Image (spheres, rainbow, N blue to C red):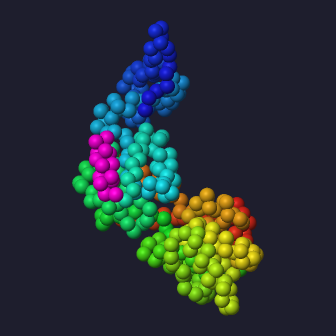
Amino acid sequence: MIAKVSKQPLGGAYQRSTIRDVAEKAKTSVTTASRALNGTGRMTDETRKRVHEVAAELNYRPNSIARGLVQQRSFTLGLLTNDTYGRFTLPMVTGLSEAMVDRGVSVFLSAGEYKPERLQLNLRAMEEKRVDGLVITGKRIDRGLPIELPPMGMPVVYVNAACPKGATGFVPDDLNGAKNAVNHLISAGRRKIAHITGPYDFKAARLREQGWRHALYESGLEPYGNALFSSWTEAHGYDATRMLFSSSDEKPDAIFCGNDQIARGVVDAFALLGISVPDDVAIVGYDNWEIFAKATRPPLTTVDMELAGLGRSAGLALLDMIAGKVVKPGIQEMPCKLIVRESCGADSGRNML
């Protein structure tokens, strides 16, 4: 990182604050000033505090190139993904970057669609930049990138992607996220809860279907028919809803949707059928994709996968690996959060775990 310009001598050449400037003003040696800023060495709390105050006053930042040469690190993490749209990756990068910025570490993002040759080029670019660690992420928890990773010589963590045996990965806890959503509908008095979700070959869709069933069974309720699997689209939500309400059978009083796009299609179908949300039927979605959730009328209650939290967890795990600490291998399922808005009939603005 580069320090802010501290002074401008004649001729227009700028000078940046150096560790020597900090040491001189703090009345310490250069070694003591450096150790104080790095959180190492033995000194009084008063000295360490004084050095930090002077560094802040001079807007001093350590020279990352020099620091990297000394410590043989680039202070950069790589993130490789095939999620070029960024729906899942960008929130993760936000969380990852926020966790790294105070530690002087930057994130190098590289997206390569689902083309092996493009991903291989991006991977080589990261190796050339000598990133200290690598995050692999994608669009679904049961599929990795379509490339074989060579021996990397650096730690690798997987997020929202298939995790090889012996590696460390972080995914949303989809089963319990779905259970919490359905339990919320049950607590609101709904008893006939249908489920419309995405393709069966997605593990996330199957886990959310299992969560729907578990919550109902644990409350002594039967599922309203079978889960309706198809695409993650508004069209699927719309068509499935028209089918559910076209028969003369007893209608559901709530629908748990596998994602927010499906839920948006359900709402559109209800608008044409003259069905009121949530008075007649309550709706809960999944993803907390705000472009859909907040724009839906009424605003959509939905499950937030806490993608930024996944990014933070992955980054901190990588830092521990880089520091030589033992990090538990395997997949860690991270809690989701229910975001309560108006579509479920509860008070809006109230969040639940």
Whether residue 75 is situated above or below residue 56 in the rendered picture: below
Residue 30 higher or lower than 324, as above or below: above
The secondary structure making up most of the magenta span is: helix
Left or right, 267 with respect to 153, comes to right
Nearer to me, 104 or 257 = 257
**Does residue 329 show up?**
no
Q: Position of residue 205 (x, y in %)?
A: 49, 73
Residue at figure coordinates x 31%, y 41% from the top left: 129
Residue 22 seen in this snapshot: yes
Q: Is residue 337 above or below residue 104?
A: below
Q: In terms of depth relative to the viewer, which is nearer, 178 or 250?
A: 250
Q: Residue at x 66, y 60 (%)?
A: 294
Judge whether residue 126 is colored magenta. yes
**What residue lies at 31% left-to-right and 64% top-to-bottom?**
164
Question: Which portion, as a residue range, is magenta?
Answer: 115-129
Q: Is residue 111 magenta?
A: no
- Please tell me whether residue 57 is drawn above or below residue 330 in the rendered image: above
